Image (tube, grey):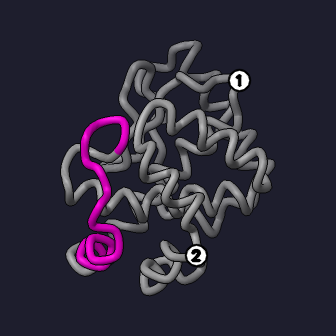
Amino acid sequence: MLATGSVAERAAQQDLRALCAAHPLDLYTLTRVVRIEQGAVPHSHPILTLNTRYRGEPDRLLATYLHEQMHWKVKAADGPALVAAVQAAFPELPTEPLLGARDRTSTFLHVAVCYGEVQALRDLLGRDRAERAIEAAAAERYRALYELAIRRAAEVARVLHPWFAPLA
């Protein structure tokens, strides 16, 4: 669905449709209701909302789409148990903007979101393309969390196994 039907929104919708046709996204798609809104900050709830920023950049658009889908996966999990497990395993994670998320709870939840995003991108794009897309995302947000998801993937997988078994 488009917020206004602008040219930019229609172009982003076409790009997203092309990605959906090019990649087997069923394993990673928890909601099929997607809104495209020019100028919006991408978010997952209550409606998964993407903006028009990554028109013509399919790997970045895919990363953003998967990131927001992973929020749906995490929301379906037992949040307090997931946060406790991640916090126990990685208590040193920073929470300040750019490195972590907005607070400690969000940071620990975003470990799962970022891990799921990285794993899905690797499955869909291959390791090199996935990591280029993640490096670009990490330049803007969640730097320490993406680094953890890439550099310590086996540890993160063990911690998240109860919630992310299909991706581990």
N-terminal-most mark, 1 or 2 = 1
Disc 1 + disc 2, Cβ < 8 Å: no
The spot of residue 37 in percent (x, y) is: 43, 26
Direction bottom: furthest residue: 162
- Callout 2: helix, strand or loop? helix
Near-viewer residue (55 or 7): 55
Residue at the (45%, 31%) spot, across then down: 140
Please identify the quarter of the rendering in which residue 143 is found.
top left
Mark carried by residue 56: 1
Residue at the (70%, 48%) spot, across then down: 130
Looking at the rendering, the stretch of residues picked out in magenta corresponds to: 82-99
Near-viewer residue (56 or 112): 112
The spot of residue 46 in percent (x, y) is: 29, 50
Picture layout, residue 51 above or below residue 108: above
- Which residue lies under the disc numbered 2? 154
Residue at the (25%, 55%) spot, across then down: 106
The spot of residue 146 in percent (x, y) is: 50, 51
Near-viewer residue (141 or 39): 141
Residue at the (37%, 67%) spot, across then down: 74
- Callout 1: helix, strand or loop? loop
Q: Nearer the viewer, mark 1 or mark 2?
A: 2
